[in-house]
Amino acid sequence: MPKFVAAGDEYQSPVSPLVSVIVTVHDAAETVRYCVDSILRQSYANLEVILVDDGSNDDGPAILDEYARRDDRVKTIMLSDLNASHGGGERGDKPDQSGTDPESEVMGPESETEPSTHDAAIPVDDTVPVDDVDYDAPDHVDDNASAIGVVDSAIDAIDDAAAENGDVAARARNAGLDATHGEYVAFVGSDGVLDRRAIELLLHALIKTGADMAKSRWERFTPDQLYAVSEVSAEGAREPESVTVFTDALEAYQSVFLKSVRVLGDEFGHNTEARYLNDEDWGRLYRASVWDDVRLPEGIYSPELLAAGELYSRMSKVADMDIVLYRVLDGDADESRRFRYYHDRFTAGTANFRFAFDKGILPARSYYTMVTAYEQAKSAPDFDVPEHQEQFVLDTAELEELRGKLTLAQRMQCMGVRRMRLFEESVKRILPASLAKPTYSPDGGELA
């Protein structure tokens, strides 16, 4: 467990590598300013900020173009269901790759300045003001009360879009990945806020440990906390006392799953929480090479879940820091999912099950995912649709096939993990929100 050396003190990199930050946006005009502001005020300045709008119907595209004109590190990509383009400007010098919408358009600043590249690095400066942007007094916020209503409407819009399109962010993320030039890549949701030192600390941990991914803790906040979270994040986090490094990412993903196991492991000094890997990209920084030839599947729910096994198998080392560097707006989960949602999760579970099993890893987590999705599909309001019944028969056969691959001992172990996880979920439902999930606390801004 290497000690952490503050990047601004003893550690000085002779070259400041370019970091690409991808933000996916869909009908998020009321929250995206907080998100982009938190990125542009990062203590690490050599950034390529790629803002990808996937067919928004609000003022989002105009807001993104505004940022592209104000800061030459920002590029915008406008997508739509009709493959129509929005905005102007030229695509960067990176050649087109498969998966990019050929009719999408990348917009940069109106000046002749070229997008940031490795040959034109922006020097690191711990106080990185962006010209003409006053981050201490954002003009898009008057007070908390005025923000709550518009943020609530943004949550509703995002939930509606997800219900209609599966995961609208997959196509946008893929387009962003195809446009990157950086050695490192981070993803930020349009309803997320980055700590001011997030990129600096994650990059420092990545470089010092030689890891393929660095991760931190994250927490949720409510609409009425948006302005306070923005202010706290602007102050910048402390350095972590140490960095935990582990080498078996795929095995950790499948085995370090239960909250009870993580808590007990930490109590006995095993630092188990550090090895926990979820299906989200929050609070992470990747080596760009991890994403070579990997793109999220489009048109399905939970595309990150389907891609998880492949991504984690590519990581020789992962670095973890026990500090909060990312905060995300909390939205209410939709309890009335339709059959397609559960089937997509079942498909992701089976794919990761096969992937791990073929590598000699017990797929306990994927067993939970596929069996739970299979059972939940029965309660979907459209379960009785004939085509869904036909699909369910096929899913049943696949489930039995995969169960048959396990020895009796392995099957009992997977069943035990699933039952314990279901128990944890039932307990979480009766707990206050602040105890059920990592939640922003105004007293110090740490996990509640």
Image (cartoon, grey):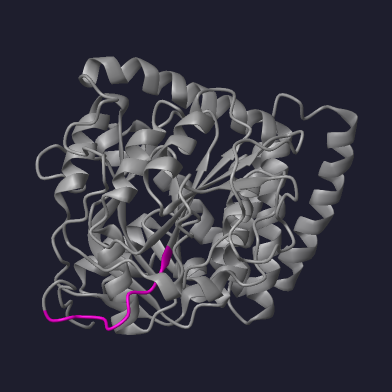
Instruction: Please indicate, yes or no, whether residue 439 appears anywhere in the rendered image.
Output: yes
Residue 335 placement, left or right of 100: left
- Per the picture, the main secondary structure of the magenta-coloured stretch is loop
Residue 382 position, x and y percent, is 76, 26
Please state, as top left, top right, bottom left or bottom right, where the C terminus lies in the image: top left
Name the spot of residue 274 as percent of width and height, x first: 32, 68
State whether residue 174 is above or below residue 317.
Answer: above
Q: Is residue 441 magenta?
A: no
In the rendered image, is residue 334 in sight?
no
Asked if residue 159 lies left or right of residue 421, the reply is right
Is residue 13 in the magenta section? yes
Residue 334 falls left or right of residue 13: right
Quarter of the image that includes the N terminus: bottom left
Image coordinates for residue 434, horizontal then vertical, percent: 25, 36
Q: In this picture, is 432 found above or below 275?
A: above
Query: Residue at 22% across / 19% down in the picture?
Result: 142
Depth check: give the residue in front, 336 or 92. 92
Residue 157, percent from left and from top: 53, 23
Seen as rendered, the residue at the extreme front is 112
Most foreground residue, 138 or 327: 138
* Magenta-tinted stretch: 10-19
Give the quarter of the image for residue 127: bottom left
Q: Quadrant of residue 126?
A: bottom left
Q: Closer to the camera, 395 or 213?
A: 213
State how many labels appear: 0
Position of 289 with respect to 448 (left or right) is: right
